[in-house]
Image (cartoon, helix red, strand yellow):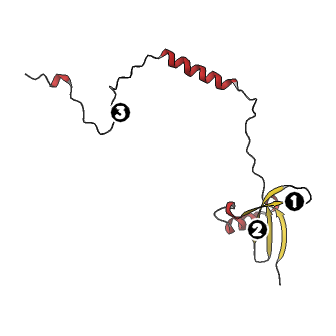
Amino acid sequence: MSKKRTIISYDKLNIDQKKQLLIAFPEGFSGNTTKMTNPITGEVFDSLLWETDEIIYLVKLPKVTVKSPSVDDDDDDFEDDFDSVDAKGEDDDVSDDDDDDDSYDDAPEESEDDDDED
């Protein structure tokens, strides 16, 4: 006897089915998804083929949307940041002396007073 086949949205699965789905795919769905197209609406969606003892499910997965800021949002904020960096760079008189100890394996420096032992 062949198994029943059904198409179901992930959102319509009950809690027990979602738990079974997670047990069946403990590493996630990413390598097991297939892009499908609804022939009536033309909608493209990801789906997952999930087989249980009694039923073979084609699970329609929800779309993951990433919100991005709009192009018009506060373009001037970045210019203000660059202006403040430029202003700091002009005001700082930092010399490039290498008096700071930059390495970890240098031997400790002896003070000049120790060399004048007479």
Viewer-proximal residue among 76 and 6: 76
Q: Are marks 3 and 1 in contact (CB under 8 Å)?
A: no
Residue pointed to by mark 2: 49
Q: CA distance from mark 2 to mark 3?
A: 58 Å
Q: Quadrant of the N terminus?
A: bottom right
Left or right of 5 on screen, residue 68: left
Disc 3 designates what residue? Answer: 102
Q: Quadrant of the C terminus?
A: top left
User: Left or right of 55: which side holds 114?
Assistant: left
Assess disc 2: are there few (<14), some (14-19) or many (≥20) residues with their C-alpha within 10 Å of its C-alpha. Answer: some
Give the total of numbered labels.
3
Residue 108 vs residue 37, the one in the foreground: 37
Which residue is at a point 21% across and 25% down the rendered structure image?
Answer: 111
| Residue 36 percent location from the top left of the image | 81, 61
Task: Classify residue 103 by image quadrant.
Answer: top left
Would residue 100 be found to the left or right of residue 107 on screen?
A: right
Q: Earlier in the sequence, mark 1 or mark 2?
A: 1
Amino acid on which disc 2 is placed: Leu
**Inter-mark Cα distance, 3 to 1:** 62 Å
- First reached walking from the N terminus: tag 3 or tag 1: 1
Side of 58 relative to 27 (left or right)? right
Label 1 residue SS: loop
